[in-house]
Every structure is written in C-alpha cells, then in structure tokens.
Image (cartoon, helix red, strand yellow):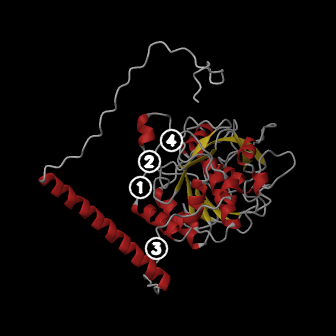
Amino acid sequence: MSRRLAAVLACVLSGVLVPVPASAAPGTNCAEPARVGAVPPWPRAMLTPDAVWPFTRGGGAVVAVLSTGVDADQPQLRGHVLPGFDAVSGRGRADTDCAGTGTQVAGVIAAQPADGSPAVGLAPGAQIQPVRVVPDDVAGTPVADPAWLARGISWAVARKVQVIVVATPVDRDTRALRDAVADAVSRGIVLVAATGTGDGADGDRARKPYPAAYDGVLGVGAVDADGRIWADSPAGDFVDLVAPGVGVPTLQRGRGIVLVDGTGVAAGFVGASAALVGAKRGDLVGPDIVRALVATASPAPLDETYGAGVVNPYAALTNRVVTPSARPLPRVAGGSLAESGTERRRRDLAFGGSLLAVLAVVGVLVMTAAARRRRWRPGLPPVLPVVDEPVEPGPPVLLLADEPAGSRPN
C-alpha cells in the first residue's frame, strides 16, 4: 500500500477528511503542512463567537481531545497544548501529531486568532489535553480501538478535565469503554463524541458509533454552511446535536491550514461550546451543561440526522434552563375563626329565611292537595262581550257649533 493511499484511508476511517499531499514527509509517513487560499470562515458566522467572547473565552477550561495527538508547536496553538498521554502505547506524551487529525479538532476549539488566518477557535482561552487513541504512524493501524479509548477516557478523568471530545469513534461496545464513559459522566465531565462517517447505505447507518451511543454522551453530526446535513453524517438516536463539519478551515500540523469535512471537527465545536458554558457558569456540572446545549440548540428539521438542532453557544451561555421538578404543596392546617355577633345574626337570618321558604312550599302543597280532594278547579274569567263596530263612521259632531233653537234646556 502506498503512503498516499494509507494516509487517505487513515483520515477517512477516523471520521475526518484531510487534504493529503502528493508525497509524505520522507521516512515519517506524516501529513505535510498544507495551506489553503482565502476562504470564508463560515463557522464563525454560524456560531457567532464574537457575541460570546465578551462573556468568556473559555479561560480555565481544559478540554481533552482523543484522536491522533495534537501538535503543540502549531503557531496558533502554542502555549495552549498540555503534554497529554499516549493511550495506544500506555505511556508517553501526545503533544505531537503525525496524521494531523487531532490538531484539526484542537484548532476549532482553541486556535488563537492570527492575521491572515481563517482558522480561529471557538474557545481560544481553553487548554487542550491531547490523548492519542490512534497510532502515530498513518501507515499503520488507522482506526482506534475500544481499549485505547477506554484507557484515554480514564486518564483524562483522572486529570480532572472539564470536557472530553472523542473525535475518533469505534463501532464496538465493550464493558471497559462503557464503564469508563459512565465514570466520566458520573463525575460531572461533559463527554462529546463524533458519530463517525457512513456512505449512506442502510447497513453502515445502522451501525452505532461508540461512545456517542451511550447514555449521557453528546453525539454530534455535521452540517454545511447552508445548514444541510453532511452526506456522510450518520442518522440515529445517538445524534444529539449538529455543528459545522463541511469545508471547515482549521489548523494542520506544522504551520498548515486545511479545509476539513467530518463529524470530528463538528464534535470539536460542541466541546468548545461546553467549555465556554462551564467557564462562565461555574455553578453548572456536566449534566446541566449538556441539558443547556441541547435545550438551546437552533431549530433544525425533525430528522434523526440533526438531533435537537445546531449547537448555539451564545444561547446556551445566556439562557437559563430550569430543570422541571415535582414539588409537593405545603401542608396547611385548617384554622377556626372566632364567630362575631354580626356573623351570628347573619347565620340566624339565613336559617330563618330558609325555614320560612320551606314552610311556604309545604303549605302550598297541602292546600293544593285539599282542593283536589274537593274537586276544586280554578275558575275562568267571563268572556268579554263582542260589540259590533259600524263599518262606516257616523257624521262628524261639531263640539263648539251653536245648538238649534229650542234644543237648549230651559
């Protein structure tokens, strides 16, 4: 297998597509730095970090990135990458990156603004704790192993990171991985996981990615600049949110800038959002931050590829999500009021009036029964006489006319 083909295969299977040069660096099999021309930083327009940064830039948050390692010498990451841990070998650091995938994910989280660079992290104040869960040589085994993921998650938990981003998922559920994830969630750590890739076939989309499919983990899909789902973003109940993941400008090892497709960088944006919320809202723990991110997501089509919608860090940071809880009503003891003279008179009048009404009704009933026994019936009024009216009126009578002689009485 050629070095070029091995590098391409490694990046595709890890969930992130990386531009690979025609020839790899001699003797290292590592991706060479690359630089793209001027590209619009569309994720910045979609996620509006400029509106978030007046509140926080994520200072104090530590985000573990589980991938191929992170290049600590990348100029825009310098000073923000900790030594990390190589979970593949079980020892050593992970602050170098041969394949470049981990550096790409770290770039969308914590890349520092630089003149002429379209890449900037959503949480530039955060620190990156790199954890290698994919072999360093892209010509070797290009996929992660559940045992390496479990070891890397447990190591990150022991270092008390606030957020864990799994950029390279696996398709096997193991007890060790399940236990490591459950331990991280129980300790209040936000665990974000890419959902991987698929070619659209039903068989591939039916395969669940881990740890995204576990309870308490934020599974992340990818969308483009128009909000359309990435063609290779899997569908399923394991997708909780989506984020930019098509043509994303981000960092490459060395001094490179590349355009990347994949759910790995999308998970990086969600992890950065969690770091921002945690840095600003110190009263929130992992489940609270997860609830805030899901509840404030920007609306999207009701589809299993979108989950709750597009992550919205500004809304998650500024909106307050109240957890519903059933609270019993307080017990109220019935009190007795002292009866005043006025109340007593009102009661007596009401009682007397009711008694009189009852007696009147009873009297009417008794009288009616007695009358019926005597065959009494109510009489009818006499018929009014009918007077024939003349058809034509008589001659008019003049009231003030002189009377004829001899008609006036003496």
Residue 141 relative to residue 363: left or right: right
Q: Earlier in the sequence, mark 4 or mark 2?
A: 2
The amino acid type of the residue labelled 1 equals Asp
Between marks 2 and 1, how big is the CA–CA gap? Answer: 9 Å
Contact between marks 3 and 4 (CB within 8 A): the answer is no
Contact between marks 2 and 1 (CB within 8 A): the answer is yes
Q: How far across and how far down the image is residue 258, in percent?
A: 73, 42
Residue 246 relative to residue 254: left or right: left
According to the picture, the residue beneath numbered tag 1 turns out to be: 173
According to the picture, the residue beneath numbered tag 4 turns out to be: 234
Q: Earlier in the sequence, mark 2 or mark 1?
A: 1
Q: Earlier in the sequence, mark 3 or mark 2?
A: 2
Residue 358: mark: none
Give the foreground label among 3 and 4: 3
The amino acid type of the residue labelled 2 equals Lys
Q: Secondary structure at mark 4?
A: loop
Q: Earlier in the sequence, mark 3 or mark 4?
A: 4
Q: Secondary structure at mark 2?
A: loop
The residue positioned 78% from the left and 58% from the top of the image is: 53
In which quadrant of the rendered view does residue 55 lie?
bottom right
Q: How far across and how far down the image is residue 390, in percent?
A: 44, 16
User: Quick one: quadrant of the N terminus?
Assistant: top right
The amino acid type of the residue labelled 4 equals Pro
Residue 292 relative to residue 47: left or right: left
Name the outermost residue toward the top: 392
Residue 208: mark: 2
User: Quick one: quadrant of the C terminus?
Assistant: top right
Give the foreground label among 3 and 2: 3
Give the foreground label among 3 and 1: 3
According to the picture, the residue beneath numbered tag 3 turns out to be: 329
Q: Secondary structure at mark 3?
A: loop
| Front residue of this view, candidates 408 and 401 | 408
